[in-house]
Image (cartoon, rainbow, N blue to C red):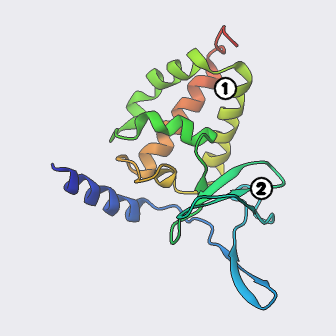
């Protein structure tokens, strides 16, 4: 399969595997209609726009401190280096990431502190229990795996990190 075929396959799976993402809410300001985003985790909290380069808007939730990114016409997703992005980045090209969960969890434990591991597990569990975004869309260009497979991967990683003792370097 060529690169174009893989991209088309990812796009088809993306449409099929979508989780309902929260849409931007219209915001009236001095008679002008703008779109203001709500936090994916704190839906009643309006996000604050951060300085952003052209072609993307970064946001900060004043309530929970999470940061998000959004390109024009695309869904709001977690910003780079957020807990979920950190975990899915290593399996960006995997079609079956859940098969790599044990290896990846061991690698995460080798460099993350005990506190960071606990935070990552809490963020994974929150997303699994109450989906707020398409995991496939967290990384630019999408991912090779289906939404279901990525969520299974996240769940397995969280289970492994929760069951094992934290890294001794913590």
Q: State the separation of the CA atoms marked 2 and 1.
A: 22 Å
Residue lying farthest to the top in this orientation = 168
Q: Which residue is mark 2?
A: 61
Where residue 76 sits in the image (x, y, percent)?
A: 59, 61
Residue 19 image label: none
Residue at coordinates 73% horizontally, 88% vertically from top-left?
32
Q: Residue at x 39, y 65 (%)?
A: 15
At horizontal 61% and vertical 16% (from top left) the residue drawn is: 164
Q: Is residue 60 visible?
A: yes
Find disc 1 in the rendering and name its residue. Answer: 117
- The earlier-in-sequence mark between 2 and 1 is 2
- Residue 154: image location, x then y, percent: 53, 38
Q: Is residue 83 left or right of residue 137?
A: right
Query: Quick one: SS at disc 2?
Result: loop
Q: Is residue 170 above or below residue 80?
A: above
Q: Nearer the viewer, mark 2 or mark 1?
A: 2
| Label 1 Cα crowd, 10 Å radius (few <14 / some 14-19 / many 20+) | many
In front of the other: 106 or 92:
92
The correct choice, above or below, for 8 with respect to 106 in the image is below
Question: Toward which corner of the image does residue 69 lie, by quadrant?
Answer: bottom right
């Amino acid at each position: 399969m060529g690169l174009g075929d893989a991209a088309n396959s990812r796009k088809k799976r993306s449409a099929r595997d979508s989780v309902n993402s929260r849409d931007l809410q219209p915001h009236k300001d001095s008679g002008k209609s703008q779109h203001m985003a709500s936090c994916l985790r704190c839906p009643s909290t309006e996000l604050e726009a951060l300085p952003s380069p052209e072609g993307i808007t970064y946001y900060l939730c004043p309530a929970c401190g999470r940061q998000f990114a959004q390109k024009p016409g695309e869904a709001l997703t977690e910003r780079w280096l957020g807990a979920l992005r950190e975990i899915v980045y290593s399996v960006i090209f995997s079609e079956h990431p859940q098969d790599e969960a044990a290896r990846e969890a061991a690698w995460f434990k080798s460099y993350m502190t005990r506190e960071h591991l606990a935070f990552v597990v809490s963020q994974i569990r929150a997303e699994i229990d109450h989906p707020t975004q398409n995991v496939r869309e967290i990384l630019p260009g999408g991912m090779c795996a289906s939404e279901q497979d990525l969520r299974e991967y996240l769940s397995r990683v969280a289970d492994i990190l929760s069951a094992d003792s934290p890294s001794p370097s913590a």
